[in-house]
Image (spheres, helix red, strand yellow):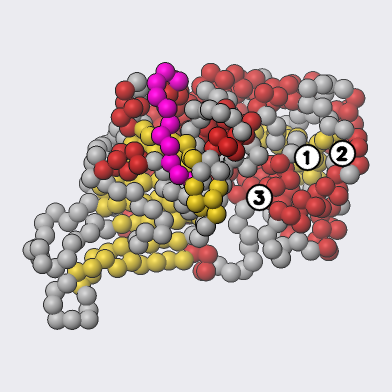
């Protein structure tokens, strides 16, 4: 069992804290995973906000927890763990001494987690004040959110600044996708089943698709999103991390160092896409108004309330990993907002049979396909060819084995990536966090794409509610491949 800890949430009144971090801690409490004596210290900028914080948290939990999770009894006990405090993260004033005094009321060996739910621009000043005011103890850790920086250089600057005050093993860089139970199941599937592992390479696999499609649009994040775009917001982190987990070699052990070493090797083997490679292998898109679930939704520019913007809300990439295992296998990475369905899924398309012994009259022999759906439902589907059993003729057809993981476990456990990651940070378990070298390597691959886009071209338009621009289909058609869109028959 985890020891009690203190977690200071800088930016405690912000969207992330109210929507994700507080519900995560509340769930931890409800499951008995918030050790007694732990404290949650959300920071706000003004005394008036501090005074009303408990009520703010109350409202946020009622709004953002799932149906049936909130109840008055648990809230009463949970709210007793909340200690709102005032701090200004850019000014080393007396409020920081008050925060220190509160933390120092407890044993100095108690874990302290400083969660920077703040814009990256103030990470440096916040860490500097934590240090100058003497809040960083041996058992302190800092958690920072993605995206780290806007490019390789800015990420390096941020990482270097944090490193002035915290050692690398005290820095926990979050990518919430890694906290999803289903994403960890990906490793379980690969490394505890010889069935797949023996057929997980260029000899057996024709192509792999990783798609993260969303139906939401800007969600009042216009200021951030228009500067970032889908490449920085989703590809640089979530998609590349998933790619690493799908493509990496088996780590020697399931510990942070071994996993990171293998992930880093994948990032290092990603074939660089420079200059015209970018035009040939990447499609970027932006949504225009369209029909989503029977409603007409506005386009990106309307949501943004601007006449023009080149920001991409969709990206599709044909990537290659130049190593022994994956030589010649295209990895198609795709993400977009306002797409037809919300879904995160990995589709592994196996090679066609080497020789068709049946001739042409038995139906088409489809390649085997493994679909690992991470959300919204958690399923694993394997499509095999089979003889139709309802007649004497030899007729083949694809049949699908469907494992619905969410139905397999119904003990009330609420899978929540932030809960898992916050508790891991408190327990000093960095396996699911990102090392500085991974951030550096990921940007090294992304930077030339951004540069090329700044020089040339515009996003292709796609209707909200569709699967992205036509160019994305053409990207696959060039190699005789087709996107597997969720809802398609597996
Ligand atoms: C975040 C992105 O990291 O991930 C958002 O900033 C995106 O733009 C979100 O909507 C998607 O996360 P999930 O867990 O809902 O798939």
Mark 2, residue position: 49
Residue drawn at 31 percent across, 23 percent down:
276
| Mark 3: C-beta under 8 Å from nearest atom of ligand 1 | no
Do tag 3 and tag 1 residues touch (Cβ < 8 Å)? no
* C-alpha separation, residue under disc 1 versus residue under disc 2: 8 Å
* Earlier sequence position, callout 3 versus callout 1: 1
Mark 1, residue position: 13
| Residue 99 position in % (x across, y down) | 86, 33
The verdict on residue 42 being magenta is no
The kind of secondary structure element at disc 2 is helix
| Residue 76 position in % (x across, y down) | 86, 58
- Name the front one of labels 3 and 2: 2
Q: What residue range appears in magenta?
A: 454-464
Residue drawn at 75 percent across, 35 percent down:
11
Horizontal side, residue 297 vs residue 34: left or right: left
The front one of 398 and 159 is 398
Mark 3, residue position: 419
The verdict on residue 457 being magenta is yes
């Amino acid at each position: 069992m985890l020891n009690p800890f203190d977690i200071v949430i800088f930016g405690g009144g912000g969207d992330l804290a109210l929507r994700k971090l507080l519900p995560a801690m509340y769930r931890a409490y409800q499951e008995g995973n918030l050790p007694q004596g732990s404290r949650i210290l959300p920071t706000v900028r003004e005394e008036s906000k501090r005074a009303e914080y408990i009520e703010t948290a109350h409202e946020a939990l009622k709004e953002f927890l799932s149906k049936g999770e909130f109840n008055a009894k648990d809230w009463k006990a949970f709210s007793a763990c909340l200690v709102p405090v005032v701090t200004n993260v850019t000014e080393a004033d007396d409020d920081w001494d008050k925060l220190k005094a509160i933390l120092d009321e407890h044993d100095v060996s108690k874990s302290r987690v400083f969660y920077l739910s703040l814009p990256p621009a103030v990470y440096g000043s916040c860490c500097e004040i934590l240090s100058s005011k003497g809040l960083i103890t041996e058992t302190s850790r800092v958690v920072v959110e993605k995206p780290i920086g806007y490019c390789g250089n800015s990420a390096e600057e941020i990482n270097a600044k944090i490193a002035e005050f915290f050692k690398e093993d005290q820095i926990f860089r979050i990518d919430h996708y890694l906290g999803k139970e289903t994403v960890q199941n990906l490793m379980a599937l690969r490394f505890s089943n010889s069935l797949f592992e023996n057929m997980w390479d260029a000899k057996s696999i024709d192509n792999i698709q990783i798609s993260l499609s969303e139906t939401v649009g800007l969600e009042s994040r216009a200021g951030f999103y228009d500067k970032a775009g889908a490449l920085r917001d989703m590809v640089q982190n979530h998609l590349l991390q998933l790619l690493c987990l799908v493509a990496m070699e088996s780590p020697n052990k399931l510990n942070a160092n071994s996993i990171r070493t293998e992930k880093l090797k994948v990032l290092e083997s990603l074939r660089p896409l420079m200059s015209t490679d970018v035009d040939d292998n990447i499609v970027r898109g932006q949504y225009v108004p369209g029909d989503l679930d029977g409603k007409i939704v506005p386009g990106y520019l309307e949501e943004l309330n601007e006449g023009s913007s080149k920001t991409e809300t969709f990206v599709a990439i044909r990537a290659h990993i130049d190593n022994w295992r994956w030589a010649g296998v295209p990895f198609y990475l795709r993400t977009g907002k306002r797409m037809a369905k919300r879904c995160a899924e990995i589709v592994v398309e196996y090679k066609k049979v080497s020789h068709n012994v049946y001739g042409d009259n038995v139906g088409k022999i489809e390649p085997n396909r493994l679909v690992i759906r991470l959300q919204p439902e958690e399923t694993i589907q394997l499509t095999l060819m089979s003889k139709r059993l309802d007649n004497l003729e030899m007729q083949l057809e694809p049949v699908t084995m469907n494992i619905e993981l969410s139905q397999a476990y119904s003990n009330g456990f609420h899978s929540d990536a932030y809960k898992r990651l916050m508790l891991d940070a408190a327990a000093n378990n960095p396996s699911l966090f990102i090392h500085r070298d991974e951030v550096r390597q990921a940007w090294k691959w992304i930077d030339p794409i951004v540069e090329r886009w700044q020089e040339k071209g515009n996003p292709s338009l796609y209707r909200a509610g569709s699967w992205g621009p036509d160019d994305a289909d053409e990207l696959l058609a060039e190699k005789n491949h087709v996107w597997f869109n969720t809802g398609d028959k597996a």
